[in-house]
Image: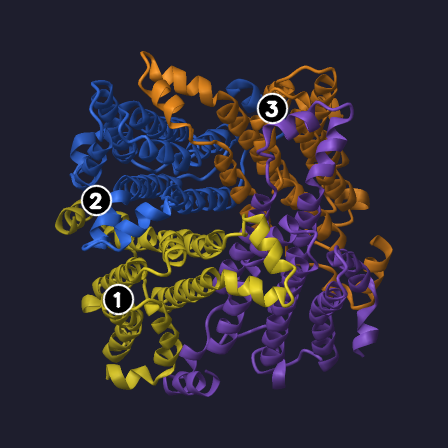
Chain colours: A blue, B orange, C purple, D yellow
Amino acid sequence: MGKGVQGMAGAQGAIREVMGKNRLENLTDGIFAFAMTLLVLGIEVPTDADAAAQALSDMNPVKALLVSLYPDITHYMLAFVIIAAFWVIAHSFSEHIRYVDRKLLWLNIAKLMFVALIPFSTDLADTYVQFPNAALLFEANIVIVGALMYLQWAYASKNHRLINPKLPDAEIRHIKVRILAMPAIALVAMGVALTGVTWSMLLFVLAPLIYALPLKKLAG
Amino acid sequence: MGKGVQGMAGAQGAIREVMGKNRLENLTDGIFAFAMTLLVLGIEVPTDADAAAQALSDMNPVKALLVSLYPDITHYMLAFVIIAAFWVIAHSFSEHIRYVDRKLLWLNIAKLMFVALIPFSTDLADTYVQFPNAALLFEANIVIVGALMYLQWAYASKNHRLINPKLPDAEIRHIKVRILAMPAIALVAMGVALTGVTWSMLLFVLAPLIYALPLKKLAG
Amino acid sequence: MGKGVQGMAGAQGAIREVMGKNRLENLTDGIFAFAMTLLVLGIEVPTDADAAAQALSDMNPVKALLVSLYPDITHYMLAFVIIAAFWVIAHSFSEHIRYVDRKLLWLNIAKLMFVALIPFSTDLADTYVQFPNAALLFEANIVIVGALMYLQWAYASKNHRLINPKLPDAEIRHIKVRILAMPAIALVAMGVALTGVTWSMLLFVLAPLIYALPLKKLAG
Amino acid sequence: MGKGVQGMAGAQGAIREVMGKNRLENLTDGIFAFAMTLLVLGIEVPTDADAAAQALSDMNPVKALLVSLYPDITHYMLAFVIIAAFWVIAHSFSEHIRYVDRKLLWLNIAKLMFVALIPFSTDLADTYVQFPNAALLFEANIVIVGALMYLQWAYASKNHRLINPKLPDAEIRHIKVRILAMPAIALVAMGVALTGVTWSMLLFVLAPLIYALPLKKLAG
C-alpha cells in the first residue's frame, strides 16, 4: 500500500497527506478503554446454581468462590494491565508525532483491530486454561499488537519522517526498546507454552520489572 | 423533514440552525469506536468443551482451532476494516464542514444507526456463513451506510451550503467517489451473493486497492 | 439533598459549587453513545439453526428472515432514534448552561441511569412484543428520562440560576416544550398500551412530526 | 515500583516524568462511562417464556414483573450511583492535579481495573442475592476502589507533590474524608454481611446523607 498511497497523497498536495492526530487519538483511546472494560464480560457469573450455592454457603465461601473464579479473575487482571501498558506506550510515542499520514493511520487501525481482539483471546485463555495452546493464542495476539506498534514507531521515526525533527536518536531507540519489551515477554511465554506448560501467561508479571529497569542504558 | 426543519430553524434565527460540530464528532467517534470493539463479541469462544479440547490438544492444535474459528475471525477483520474505512472517510469530509444543521445532524444519526447495526449483521453473516443470503444482509447494511454518508456529503456540499466556500469542486467530487467506492463493492458482492455463491464478502478485500488508486483522476 | 448541598458548597466558596461542564459532557456523551450502540445486543442472531436455515434458504429468504427479525429491528430503530433525540435536546440546553452545581450534576446522573437502562427495556419490549405491558415498561422508561431532563432544565433556568442571564424567557419555555414532547408521546402510548393494544410503541413515529412543528408558537 | 520508576524518570529528565492529564482523563472517563453502561447487561430479560408470559399477562402485570426483576434493578441502581459518586470524587481531585507521574498513572490504572470489575461483582450480587457472601464480594470491590483512590490522592498531595502548591491543607484533608466515606460504608456493609444478613448493600443508600453533611467540619 506504501508507494501507491504516498503517491496519491503527493498528487493531492501535502495538506491531504496528514490527518490531525487529535481525532485519531480519540478513536484510539475509545477502543482501548472499551477493550479494557469488555474484558469483564469474560468473567462468568457461575450459572450452575447448585455449585455456586455450595461455594457461597460454604464454611469459607468467599475463598471457595474465589478459587472457582480464579482463572477468570487472574486473566482479567493480566489482560487489563497488558492493554493499559500498551496504552501508556502508545501515549508516550504519540506525543512525539506531528503528522499522521495514511500509512501510519492504517498501521494504527491494524493495531486497534488486534487490541479489540484481546477480550476474545483472554476469554479463550481463561476458559481453556488447562490447554497450553489457548495461552499460546493469547500470547500471539500480544506479539502482533507489539509488532504493529513497533512498525508504527519505526515508520514514523525513520529519518524523523512524521515526528519532531529535534527528537534525539537515543530517545527514538529508547522508545523502540520500550515497545519491544512486552512482545518479547510474550514470545518467551509462547516458547514455554510450546513445551506443554500451562500458565505460561504468568510470565507477564515480569513486565513491571522490565519497565522499571533503566531502559535508556539498554537502548544506548 | 427538510422544509419544515429549515423553516423552523429559520424562524428561530441562524444561531439555532447550526450545532457546533465538535460534540457531534464526539458522539460519532464514540459510536464508531464502540461498534468496532463490539464486533469481538461475535467471535464465540467454543462452548462445546469436547470439540474445543480435541482441537486444543491436537497434533497441530493451533491450526485446528483457527480453522474452527476462521469464519468468525475473518468476518471480524473484514467488518473492523470496513467500519474503520467509513470512519476515515467520515473524518475526511467532516474536516471540511463548518456548520451542522438539523438535516445533516439527522442524516448523521441515521448513518450511526446502521453503523451500530454492523456488529449484528457481521454476527449473522459469520454464524450462517454457508447461506449467501446472510452475507447479502451484511452487504445491504454496508450499502445503506455508504448511501447515507453520500447523502450527508451531497447535502452539505450542494452550493457549498455547509462547507468551506473555497473548497474546489474537484475535491467535492473526489470525496463523493471515495464515499461511493465501498457501497459499490458491496453492491457487486450482493449481486454475487444472489447467484448463490458463499463468501461473497471476500470481495471487500478489493477495497484497499480501490482506495489506493489515484481517485482524483476518476473524479476529475 | 438541595439545601444541604447548597449550604456545604456555600461554606466552601463559590469555586467548589460549580463543575466545569466539559467533563460532564464527556461522560454524558459517552453514556449516550454506549447506550445507543448496546441496543444492537438486543437483536438476536437466530440460534435455532433449523428455523434460520429454512428462513435463509427460502424462496424469498431475505424477506423470511427480516420478517422473523422485525420486532427486534423495529424496536432497535425506535429506541436508537429516541435516545438520539434525547441527546440532541440535551445538547441544545447544555449549550446555554454556564455552571454545574451538585444538584444539576446528580439530576444528570439520574437521567443517565435511565438512559443506560433503555437497552434493557428495549430488549424486554421486543422479546415480549405480544404483551402490551412490556411496551408499557419501555414507555415508562422514556417518561422518566424526559421528566428528569425537564427537572434539569427547570432547575437550571429558574431565575436564570445556572444559565446565560441574557437568554430570553421565550427561549427557556421553548426548550421546555421541546423536552416535554417526547415524554408526552410516551404517556399517550402508555394509555394506549393500558387498553391492551400491542405495538403502542409505534406512536413514537409521531416524534419527528412534533419536533418539526413551529414549536416556538406553541411555547410563546 | 516507586523508587525505580522515580529514578528512571529522573534520569530521563523532568519532561518524561509527567504525562499530560487530559488524555488520562479521557481514558478514565471512557472506562467509567462504559462500566456504568455495561451494568445494564446484568439485568436479565426473563428467558423463561412461560413465567414471563404469566407475569406480563397478570392482573397487575407490571407489578408482577417488577417484583421478579427487583434484585436486578435495585443492584443496577445502587451500582450506577456508586460508580457515579466515584467519578464525581475522582473529578473533584483531578482538577487539583497538575502533573501525572508514572506512579500516579499506575495507581489510576489499578483503580480503573477494579471500576471495570464492578459490572461483574454487581451481576454476582444480584444473581445470588440470597447469599450474604455475594454482597460481601461486591462490597470488597468498592472498598478496593476507594482505597486505591485514597492512595492516589495521598500520593499526589503529599508535600503538594503533584498538585497546585497553593491548595490549603484543610482542603486536602476534606477531599480525603470525601474519598473515604464510600469505602467506609462498604466496610460496615461487609461487617453486616458477615453476620449473615442479606441485603447489606442497602446500607449504600446512606451515601447521599454522608456526602450532604458539612464534611469540612469533620475534616477540620
Element on which disc 2 rests: loop
| Real-space Cα separation, disc 1 to disc 2, in angstroms | 54 Å
At numbered mark 3, what does the secondary structure look like: helix, strand or loop?
Answer: helix
- The three-letter amino acid code for the residue at tag 2 is Gln
Dot in front, 1 or 2: 1
Q: Which residue lies furthest to the top in this view?
A: B59
Q: Do labels 1 and 3 share a chain?
A: no
Q: What residue type is labelled 3?
A: Met
Q: Which residue is drawn at 26% across and 84% down?
A: D218
Check the image and report above or below for C48 versus C58.
below
Kindly state the secondary structure of the residue where label 1 is placed. Answer: loop
Q: Mark 2 points at which residue?
A: D12
Task: Report x, y in % for residue D194.
Answer: 23, 66
Q: How far apart are marks 2 and 3 (CA)?
A: 40 Å
Chain of the residue under label 1: D
Please name the residue shown 49% across and 46% down the image. A26
What amino acid is at disc 1?
Answer: Gly
Label 1, label 3: how many angstroms apart (C-alpha)? 70 Å
Q: Position of residue D196 (x, y in %)?
A: 26, 66
Picture disc at residue A8: 3
